[in-house]
Amino acid sequence: MKNIAVIGAGTMGNGIAHTFAQFNYKVNLIDISETSLEKGMATITRNLDRMVAKEKISEATKNQTLKNIVTFTSIKEGVASVDLVVEAATENETLKTKIFKELDLFCPENTILATNTSSISITQIAAATNRPNKVIGMHFMNPVPIMKLVEIIRGYNTSDEVMETIVSLSKKLHKVPVEVNDYPGFVANRILMPMINESIETLYNGVAGVKEIDTVMKLGMAHPMGPLQLADFIGLDVCLSILNVLYNGFKNPKYAPCPLLVNMVMAGKLGIKSGEGFYDYSESRKAEKVAKMFS
């Protein structure tokens, strides 16, 4: 297994492509938007430059990693001869189902189809194909080149052979694969998202402010990042999508998204990606910080 296709050039997609390419896999990075592909490749280049500066990789490894990635705007062309596809599109059930129907049509018969979904049923996604035994969840953590965990989710029909192949492949990427079963949110987000949602409820109820809530969790619970800052990092729209999957899957009110989260997403306050969430990431805010440094 040496030829990999990654669907989606966003945060997760370019991180997955970077990781495979760094370990000398040939990667086809696919996105319908040429602009997204350019941004994705620019991000990969910046991240590789940081690794060179920190002496984690050599300049030669950086250059070879970039050579290992070819970009495509066509799924049909990008998956024509690959051994594995990792879909990393937006966390939207309808979109993912559509993509997997196309992958089933255009990929070679033996190609394994993996999804990076963080909450949507693998079994449901697999049902859109004629190869449900070859569909599996491969949930990487962000930032992909750094984080060790890969949550491997077995769908109802996923074969033992495919599971063993993906577990072995994850280890070759120097990741730690953890096998879980196909229930809403799997393990990572079934536990994480209620905590984030409760943190937003705590803010919504006026118990404490944003920085105070995050400071309590960082200093009191030894979390490297506060839950509200983490929500900004993940994307508030993604958090909302995952909570909706949990709520619809379990029909339990404890998973119901906080009204504040719903309103922020409707207002376009999505976190780092939009420049503002629970914290301000705008250019004007950055300029303020620089000014204070020299005042």
Image: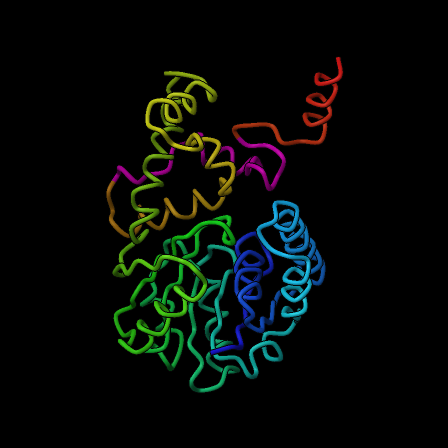
Specify the quadrant of the image occupied by residue 192: top left
Vertical relation: 33 (above or below) 268 = below
Q: Identify which residue, 128 or 79, lies in the foreground.
A: 79
Dividing the image into 4 quarters, which one contains the C terminus?
A: top right
Vertical relation: 264 (above or below) 76 = above
Q: Residue at x 69, y 27 (%)?
A: 286
Q: Which residues are magenta?
A: 253-277
Position of 254 with respect to 15 (left or right) is left
Vertical relation: 111 (above or below) 185 = below
Residue 269 lies within the magenta run: yes
Residue 65 lies within the magenta run: no
Q: Residue furthest bottom?
A: 109
Vertical relation: 146 (above or below) 95 = above
Q: Identify which residue, 58 or 27, lies in the foreground.
A: 58
Residue 133 x/y as whole percent: 32, 78
Residue 10 x/y as whole percent: 59, 55
Q: Residue at x 71, y 63 (%)?
A: 34
Number of callouts in the render? 0
Q: Identify which residue, 174 or 264, lies in the foreground.
A: 174
Q: Residue furthest top?
A: 295
Q: Residue at x 63, y 70 (%)?
A: 68
Residue 143 x/y as whole percent: 51, 48
Q: Residue at x 43, y 43 (%)?
A: 240
Specify the quadrant of the image occupied by residue 202: top left
Q: How is the image coloured?
A: rainbow
Residue 273 x/y as whole percent: 60, 42
